[in-house]
């Protein structure tokens, strides 16, 4: 843990996503860069084509943690798709991610629990999500890695009470929520979601959102704002996380870049964490 951080504060340890590192470097050098910039960890996608031995060696040499893994295929193969073969592909990818997370020493896999669209009704999505997650539980138990479901723009689980209910369907200590702060602002208030999710929150993703840009330029434009310059009430987020008893990882999920860009992200993340 870096010197400026307190283990008692909500965003106690700070990370970013592997895909954000855009310097033309090898695995060890990327780990070292992230470490030198003051991050505590980096999250990887899986399945991936990165050599496991190199990842573990870079982790051990730099002391940079790998707190979590993100399923790299849950959009391509949604867990709630009408085609059972596609649902199975998502399950298979998640199993690989769980196994990779165990090898890396990570304690969670981020999974988007499904998508509602013209071909998948809300009711069907919920039923398929419950079924699919149920099939993953033996692998969760075998690896000891948590399954952390994330709120995204998928027209599914639009209420924090629904999100909490889905987690509670399983009454399992290794099924929880990966709360994305910025994704909520389009249709809710992050602090309200945190209050409802409470101890179900396993990790936190950090991004910003501008309601003004959304209203003037369109929904997706809302994300085109730097951390700390949008409409997220970061002090309220930190207060809500504290009230929920959360003190853990917060991972930046914003457009990355070179060393200078990543250093700026780290500085902004520090300010958000201290708000």
Image (cartoon, rainbow, N blue to C red):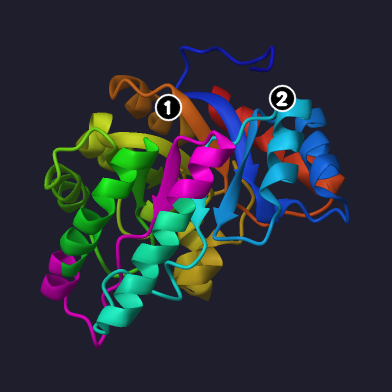
**Disc 1 element:** helix
Residue at 39% from the left image edge and 65% from the top image edge: 92
**How crowded is the residue under tag 1: few (<14 C-alpha within 10 Å), some, or many (20+)?**
many
CA separation in Å, label 2 and label 1: 27 Å
Residue at 24% from the left image edge and 83% from the top image edge: 82
- Compared across the picture, whether 97 is left or right of 262 comes to left
Q: Nearer the viewer, mark 2 or mark 1?
A: 2
**How crowded is the residue under tag 2: few (<14 C-alpha within 10 Å), some, or many (20+)?**
some
Q: Which residue is mark 2?
A: 63
Specify whether residue 252 is painted magenta: no
Residues at circles 2 and 1 in contact by the CB criterion of under 8 Å? no
Query: Can you give x and y, in whole percent of width and height, for residue 118 in the image?
Result: 25, 87
Specify whether residue 109 is painted magenta: yes
Considering the image in quadrants, where does the N terminus appear? Answer: top right
Magenta-tinted stretch: 98-127
Name the residue nearer the viewer: 250 or 176. 176
- Compared across the picture, whether 169 is left or right of 176 comes to left
Taking the image as drawn, is residue 206 in sight?
no
Residue at 14% from the left image edge and 42% from the top image edge: 168
**Disc 2 element:** loop
- Compared across the picture, whether 52 is left or right of 10 comes to right
Query: Can you give x and y, in whole percent of width and height, for residue 131 in the image?
Result: 17, 62
Q: Is residue 72 above or below residue 66?
A: below
Q: Toward which corner of the image does residue 256 lie, by quadrant? A: bottom right
Q: Toward which corner of the image does residue 151 lie, by quadrant? A: bottom left
Name the residue nearer the viewer: 148 or 152. 148
Q: Which mark is residue 238?
A: 1
Query: Which of the marked residues, 2 or 1, is nearer the chain's N terminus?
Result: 2
Q: Toward which corner of the image does residue 264 lie, by quadrant? A: top right
């Amino acid at each position: 843990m870096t010197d400026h951080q307190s283990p008692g504060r909500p965003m106690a340890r700070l990370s970013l996503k592997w895909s954000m590192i855009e310097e033309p470097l090898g695995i060890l050098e990327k780990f070292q860069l992230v470490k030198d910039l003051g991050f505590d960890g980096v999250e990887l996608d899986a399945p991936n084509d990165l050599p496991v031995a190199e990842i573990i060696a870079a982790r051990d040499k730099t002391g940079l943690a790998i707190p979590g893994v993100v399923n790299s295929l849950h959009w391509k193969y949604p867990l709630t798709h009408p085609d059972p073969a596609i649902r199975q592909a998502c399950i298979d990818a998640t199993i690989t991610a769980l196994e990779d997370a165990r090898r890396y020493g990570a304690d969670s896999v981020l999974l988007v629990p499904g998508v509602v669209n013209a071909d998948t009704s809300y009711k069907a999505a919920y039923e398929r999500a419950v079924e699919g997650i149920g099939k993953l539980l033996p692998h969760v138990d075998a690896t000891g890695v948590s399954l952390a479901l994330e709120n995204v723009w998928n027209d599914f689980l639009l209420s924090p009470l629904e999100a909490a209910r889905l987690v509670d369907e399983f009454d399992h200590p290794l099924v929880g929520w990966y709360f994305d702060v910025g994704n909520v602002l389009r249709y809710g208030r992050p602090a309200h979601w945190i209050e409802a999710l409470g101890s179900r929150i396993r990790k936190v993703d950090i991004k910003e959102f501008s309601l003004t840009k959304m209203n003037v330029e369109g929904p997706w434009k809302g994300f085109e704002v730097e951390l700390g310059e949008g409409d997220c009430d970061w002090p309220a987020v930190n207060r809500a996380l504290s009230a929920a008893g959360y003190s853990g990882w917060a991972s930046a999920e914003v457009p990355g870049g070179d060393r200078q860009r990543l250093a700026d992200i780290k500085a902004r993340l520090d300010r958000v964490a201290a708000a």
